[in-house]
Image (tube, rainbow, N blue to C red):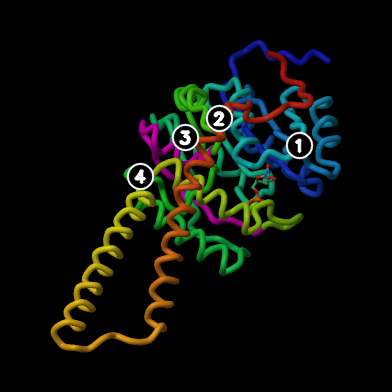
Amino acid sequence: MEKMIEEEIVLSVIIPVYNEEEIIPELYARLTSAVKEVTKNYELIFVNDGSRDSTLPQLIHLSETDPQVFYINFSRNFGHQIAVTAGIDACKGEAAVIIDGDLQDPPELIPEMYLKHKEGFEVVYARRAKREGESYFKKLTAKWFYRILRKSTSIEIPVDTGDFRLIDRKIIDCLKKMPEQNKFLRGQIAWLGFRQTAVLFNRDKRRFGTTGYPFSKMMKFAMDGITSFSDKPLTLVTRLGFIISAFSFLVILYAIFSHFFLKQTITGWTSLIISSMFIGGVQLISIGIIGEYIGRINKNVLDRPLYIIQNTNIKE
Ligand code: UDP
Ligand code: MG
């Protein structure tokens, strides 16, 4: 089948998918009809992030029947952010939409996002007005995370937004020049600046499958976000060190004073144990925080490719 579309691609849609077999048919149908409202020159790029179900065969089948469907198949699971990055590297459109493959982000919002883009915004992100069907814990941790991130970095990362957004070619080209290993795309995009705006939507609950972001992955993601955009944790550790040292110095002075002048010697090992345990804890946390940064430096020094493609139907 002839694959090449000669005209310029107006809109690329990047969809990371990891074990989403139940939803692929509906996803494809809804994406196609939403994007067709914008243009007929579009491409759908599915990035299969090491799914172990029938996601890949379905994608291959779609790409054989529809010349506007492309797939990138990773050699293993590399994670959501990396999958999106591969889509960004491969897309050819003048603009691209990043959207989750579990239909928690409604494709029907794409025409509205595109209108905003036409008004002159380089980034149109979709802000969640309401989150349905997600655990209280997830909502609470997400809320805290965004607030902490906002306080600890100097860049304006919009709250309550995921990666569902439309980005202009200018943003795509800039992102390709940011090779960091620990991807935190929404931070990188905010860091880039340009004109950014939001459209509101209600986030539906996931109907099939399970979340690919269990607690451990969420923690790593949060640490990536904070460490790649802020030195505040390191500053905090140093400050804490000074405060605790100053406090213990005062306690020492008081102990000497009371021994020589008040003729009272402070007895008991309880205070001793508690204070040394406290200091020990603070030291461990501090070393841990420093370690988080060093681990990331190490990863970037190794300079490995971000992902390995096993096969794809995208031609250079
Ligand atoms: N995903 C991925 N690789 C992963 C985990 C998730 O490509 O290792 C995809 C997943 O298929 C979905 C999107 O990333 O399209 C968002 O993941 P998920 O819905 O699990 O995250 P949540 O909505 O729970 O934050
Ligand atoms: Mg989801």
Residue at mark 1: C-beta within 8 A of ligand 1: no
Q: In the rendered view, would you say 303 is above or below 230?
A: above
Q: Are marks 1 and 3 in contact (CB under 8 Å)?
A: no
Q: Position of residue 68 (x, y in %)?
A: 72, 24
Per the image, the residue denoted by label 3 is: 115
Whether residues under marks 4 and 3 lie with C-beta atoms below 8 angstroms apart, the answer is no
Q: Mark 2 belongs to which amino acid?
A: Ala
User: Residue under circle 4?
Assistant: 156
Q: Quadrant of the N terminus?
A: top right
**Does the magenta segment cover residue 202?**
yes
Q: Nearer the viewer, residue 151 or 246?
A: 246
| Numbered tag placed on residue 96 in the rendering | 2
The CA distance from mark 4 to mark 3 is 23 Å
Q: In this view, does 105 lie above or below 188?
A: below
Looking at the image, is mark 2 or mark 3 earlier in the sequence?
Answer: 2
The boundaries of the magenta stretch are 183-205
Viewer-proximal residue, 119 or 290?
290
Quarter of the figure with the C terminus: top right
In three-dimensional space, the C-alpha distance between marks 4 and 1, rounded to whole angstroms, equals: 33 Å
Q: Residues within 10 Å of mark 3 (few under 14, many from 20)?
A: few
First reached walking from the N terminus: tag 4 or tag 1: 1
Q: How crowded is mark 1: few (under 14 residues within 10 Å), some or many (20 or more)?
A: some
